[in-house]
Amino acid sequence: MAFASNSGGGAMSDMNVTPLVDVMLVLLIIFMVTAPIASYPIEVNLPQKSLNPPPQLKEPPPPIRLRIDASGQVFWNDQTQPVSALPNLMRQEVERDPTNQPLLEIETSSDADYGVLAKVLAHAKNADMQKIGFVQND
């Protein structure tokens, strides 16, 4: 077919690519339909309908200011604390009233070591602190 002669008597050197394109498009559609769609489940805790009115909220306790400076020192409400003392301090705050926890405001220096922040966040998670915020200084 590719070398069929035309009226000029010479060999036809152009290949007809239309059937090839048609086959490739059909294969593309088949692969798109049959390929498994990558889905990643995300857990979302949606609020549930309740017939009871919410209880009267207590006044929240004052926030805890936790600051990490560039040298890796940790300040708990402006008092220097070793990182090893943080789990006990956090547990004490949670045990005072687990339903009305204070907000843990974490402020870090731009030169602070990320490892210290990771330890602080791990201690907060292990102490079951629910309210954690980050403070940004301009």
Image: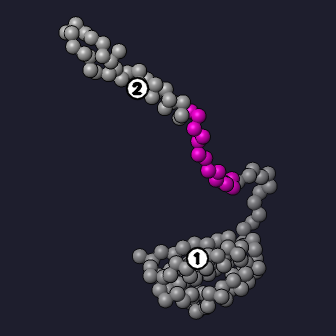
Residue under numbered circle 1: 118
Label 2 sits on a secondary structure element that is helix
| Location of residue 67 with respect to 17 vertically, above or below | below
Q: Quadrant of residue 116?
A: bottom right
Three-letter code for the amino acid on which mark 1 is drawn: Ala
Q: Is residue 68 magenta?
A: no
| Location of residue 12 with respect to 49 vertically, above or below | above
Q: Which residues are magenta?
A: 33-46
Task: Give the residue at x 46% y 25%.
Answer: 23
Q: Is residue 101 visible?
A: no
| Numbered disc total | 2
Q: Nearer the viewer, residue 5 or 113?
A: 5
Three-letter code for the amino acid on which mark 2 is drawn: Val
Task: Give the residue at x 59% y 34%.
Answer: 34
Q: Is residue 9 visible?
A: yes
Residue under numbered circle 2: 21
| Location of residue 1 with respect to 113 vertically, above or below | above
Label 1 sits on a secondary structure element that is helix
Q: Quadrant of residue 103?
A: bottom right
Q: Position of residue 125 (x, y in %)?
A: 67, 73
Task: Give the residue at x 67% y 89%.
Answer: 85
Label 2 crowd (10 A; few <14 / some 14-19 / many >=20): few
